[in-house]
Image (cartoon, rainbow, N blue to C red):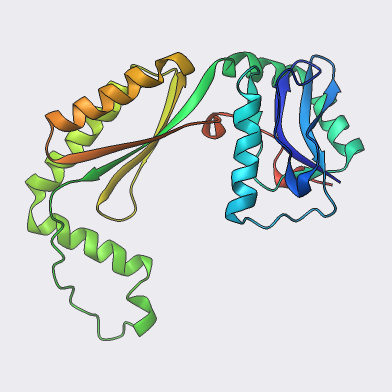
Amino acid sequence: MLYVYGIIDGSEIRTTIPRGHHRSNVAALPVGGLAAAVSDVAQSDMAPTAENVCRHDQVLDALMELHAVLPMRFGTTAHRGRLTTVLERRQVALCRALRRMSGMVEIAVRVLTSLPVVAAPIRRHPYERDDDRSSGTAYLRSRMADRRQSPPLCERREAVAMSILSRLKTLSAEATWDRGHELPLLFKASFLIASEGVREFVDTAEALALRHGEVVVRCTGPWAPYSFVTGIGKEEQA
């Protein structure tokens, strides 16, 4: 069984790579002008421990030093023959994606409110069960209560958050974001940017947050561009 870290440009690994899972060597499985970075593992299931997730990311970080990389999700495994078949079938699309990802990294951004979130008491429905209080219904009621208390405040901080995300988008090749499911998180976003633009991006994010006191902006990364690639998912493991 092969554990798959990612797909790289070129038929061989051109940089020094730390050992992979189970202390095994990471090697290239070449198919045409690309290769899968893999290591041999004894079983298909990999426990998502902090050590294992960190090892997965360390291999990807090393690969990204000299390669364009399409990262695979943690835990992706495949038999050698099945993996070779999938790479051959998708070779044109994967090569195109690798060209798009060349020199690019992902920065994760979270925009949070810096203002107090007032938790208004929620009137409990007489037929609401105890276990409903942490359900989606309870969350929606709390969100509505927050908006009823101060609609202008909610609208202002969300407008500020959107203006910051829109400005950061101009510094990226691609961007995606969603609203937060619970305050104080307003939005969570991912930006695909050139690796040499990381410092400018982070500095801009910090400057925008300082300019607008209603929100806090937190950047993490750079990461392999998980949010912007479609790889070999677990549904294709064999």
| Rendered location of residue 33, percent (x, y) | 79, 14
Q: Is residue 230 visible?
A: no
- The answer to whether 136 appears left or right of 84 in the picture is left
Q: Nearer the viewer, residue 224 or 171?
A: 224
Q: Where on the picture, by quarter, is residue 131?
A: bottom left
- The answer to whether 227 appears left or right of 83 in the picture is left
Residue drawn 63% across and 13% down?
A: 99
Q: Is residue 53 visible?
A: yes
Residue drawn 23% across and 64% down?
A: 142
Query: Taking 220 as reference, is 169 above or below it?
Result: above
What is the count of numbered marks?
0
Query: Taking 194 as reference, is 60 above or below it?
Result: below
| Rendered location of residue 166, percent (x, y) | 28, 25
Residue drawn 25% across and 86% down?
A: 126
| Rendered location of residue 163, percent (x, y) | 22, 28
Q: Nearer the viewer, residue 216 or 15?
A: 15
Q: Where on the picture, by quarter, is residue 27?
A: top right
- The answer to whether 94 appears left or right of 103 in the picture is right
| Rendered location of residue 236, percent (x, y) | 77, 43
Q: Nearer the viewer, residue 127 or 2?
A: 2
Query: Taking 138 as reference, is 107 above or below it?
Result: above
